[in-house]
Image (cartoon, helix red, strand yellow):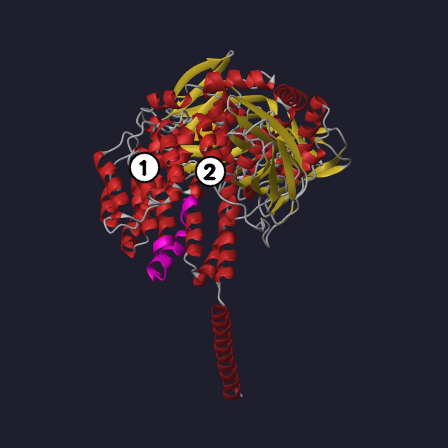
Amino acid sequence: MDSYYGEKCASSALKSFVTPFSKPHFTPDRPLNLEHIVLNVVPDFEQQSIECTATLSLKALADRVESVCLDMADLKVKSISLKDKGLLLFHSEDGKVVAQLPDEVSYGSTIEIAVEYAGKPRKGLYFRKPDKDYPSRPVQLWTQGEDEDSHYWFPCIDTPAQKATSEVLATVPASFTVISNGKLAEVKEDAAKGLKTYHYVQDKPHSIYLITLVAGEFVELKDEANGIPLLYYVPKGREDDAKRSFSETPKMVEFLAEKTGMPYPWDKYAQTCVSEYIFGGMENTSATTLTDTTLHDERAHLDFSSVPLVSHELAHMWFGDLLTCRYWKHAWLNEGFATFCEALYTQFSKGDDEYLFEMLQNQDIYLGELDRYARPIVTNVFETASELFDRHLYEKGSVVLHMLRSMVGQETFWRGIQLYVKDNAFKNVETSDLRAAFEKASGINLDAFFAQWTGRPGHPDLSVNYESKAEDVAVLRVVQKQAEDAFNFRLRVKVQYQGSAEETCSDITSKDQSIALHLARRPLYVSVDPKFEVLKTIEYVRPREMMLAQLSSDTVPGRIQAAKGLAKDASPDAVEALRKALGSDPFWGVQAEAAKALGEVGNESSLKALIGSLSVSHPKVRRAVVSALGQFKKEEAADALISLFAKGDPSYFVEAECLRSIGKTKSEKAYEFIVKGMERPSWQEVVKIGGVDGLGSLGDPKAVPVLLEKVKLGNHLRVREFSTVALGKVGRDNVEVIGRLTDLLSDYWFRVRGSAASALAELKATDAMPALTKAAEKELDGRVRRLMRESIIRLRASRTPDDELKRVSDDLDKLREENRLLKERVDRLELAGKQKG
């Protein structure tokens, strides 16, 4: 699954992931194993309801089973029958349906029950159709089972540990196409009723949350890889966009089959793009569902690609579907692996520099989440499992796998991967299974590695100082600044001379440790972790001359490390070196980091260097230049941004960044320019979203009416989401804004609800706490509930002593008023009694 949820420094004390609502979770008991399930579904697209019969084959895993307990929520059960035995007595309670069996079922015996039911699912299965606000929205149905939402549309044992074979039959209008797991066994047409029934069979076991149903009007495009049918389903008219998005799928299939040592394990691979999908993508077995926003035009393709999303979901066909985490605490074995496979395909298709840069970006994305919390990658303490699908699970998980590969070496790594896949195919896995495979492949005891990197939160926060002790000796002092205990890791150091280099590796085991470097002669520079083999934050102090030399010739991680160091140096030599790197470094990622560094320098010469680089050829570098100009609160920067936007840029994203950055400049020209510029048409309204962000950064209350208009239904969903966030930046002490944000806590679109919660916290709207509490209690989406909980915690923390006194005083006044009204009522009752007497 591709989840909904820059460079940050580690905080001195990690913020806890655990809330008052968190509790330990464990894999549930299963007295019965679901062997096979058949779903016969008849959806009503107008009423947005379903009628269905689910037939379940169950095998007893315990002695003397007296009842069948299935997960099933918000659906009306009409009957439950046992094959050859007739109807069963049943009752529903707390998201489960329990049917009493006429006789005990002994261990190893199999029974078959049929559940006939109907309802309007609130989760798990979603209908989409046009309405007055979105008249062009297509009529569609799609499901989303992860993490445990399948039981909202069919009865099951809803845990990833439950694997079964499955069949899905769906009867839909004749113009519709149905996509589901496995082989399409049959399509029956009822011409008289204008209906078709599609019958899919998935004959290899897979987890319940991976059962899928999609229905709507789609165009089917066909491809193949290694004899496997590849099918792409997109709205009519988007065929060219589909080819642009999915053209590399065959190469990805071949790549992953080779690397894992396991041929593609399913009967087909379908990718279907649907409207208003609640994730980027979901790896349903053999039939991934994707957001239709990944389809893009030729101009967007300049600097946007579907390849990361496509490779991520395809990787799940091995890591997640073939091998599935036994319980959600180990979900990084699904998501961390898929994110890592994205980067592996990048390395295969684009080279080592692109791979390393992607891993560095993954590290930065993880670091950005530390503003919210830190947690172990593997944890069973949460409120709902969906909270775990965060940047720790995806990006940090991917970097841990990158570190494992760096530690054991290429050959051993792939031997370990292939053992892991072969030994656990079609099974459930825990982190210990991965560790065991790599210990078998390497002969290395990996207890400490996994305990440290998946079992504890945080990472090393390093301060490194280079000290020259003599002509032939230097010392690197490595200090771990995090408040928590020391991390243990191996640190590679490269000493670069003119024409040659030497590398050493040192085991870092304490919070303050020195590494002695014996020098052959005066080095050009000393690079710390030049291949990016350790997850960390680092402040590295060394002579300016070393940073200048490193920027011109080190590895990509080393050159980026030098750019960051020169940003703090801020000397004329540093600015000139960054300017040159921005214009001529052979890798675009280093160019972009040089631009960012110039923005951090923030002086006149760095501003001039950035303005002079606005015509750099790579669109992602131009975007970085434009972003860096937003660091300058100067009219010269604003004028350069206005000029570029007015001229137009081949990239939608560069234009969007112009509006975003001009807001940051705080220019007097910014408001009018942004409001006018944000109406420029663009793919997925990215320019308008840039303008909305710009208004938020500008902080001008004049933007309130514009943003209130943009949050209304009928606007693009992402525009509504970003406008909600921006209201949290410009609406301080504005009663209308706080009222609107409070209303948006019940919006139909989950991202808007989550953004409204965060915006209220940003505004320190403590009066909204009761509404937030009520919204969190009703919220079905665990991700949004988490944001609401965090917002409540932030608002409580933002209260001053005066606020607390006022709250207590208000509560006392309320109690006094309630007592007064109660006394009046008692007095009236007493008076009435006397009069009656």
The residue positioned 73% from the left and 30% from the top of the image is 445
Please tell me whether residue 186 belongs to the stretch shown in magenta.
no
Q: Which residue is mark 1?
A: 609
Question: Circle 1: is it few (<14), some (14-19), or many (20+) Cα within 10 Å?
Answer: many
The answer to whether residue 789 is above or below residue 296 is below
The answer to whether residue 355 is above or below residue 466 is above
Disc 1 residue type (three-letter): Ala
The residue positioned 69% from the left and 34% from the top of the image is 32
Tell me the element at label 2: helix
Which of the numbered marks, if any, corresponds to residue 544?
2
Quarter location, residue 612? top left
Disc 2 residue type (three-letter): Arg
Q: Where residue 480 appears, x then y in whole percent?
A: 61, 44
Tell me the element at label 1: helix
In front of the other: 482 or 493: 493
Q: Is residue 581 visible?
A: yes
- Asked whether, in this view, residue 16 is left or right of residue 219, the answer is right
Question: Circle 2: is it few (<14), some (14-19), or many (20+) Cα within 10 Å?
Answer: some
Q: Where residue 715 appears, x then y in whole percent?
A: 31, 43
Q: Is residue 132 visible?
A: no
Circles 1 and 2, Cβ within 8 Å, touching? The answer is no
In front of the other: 741 or 68: 741
Of labels 1 and 2, earlier in sequence is 2
Question: Which residues are the magenta region?
Answer: 729-752
Dominant SS of magenta comes to helix
The residue positioned 44% from the left and 44% from the top of the image is 750
The C terminus sits in image quarter: bottom right
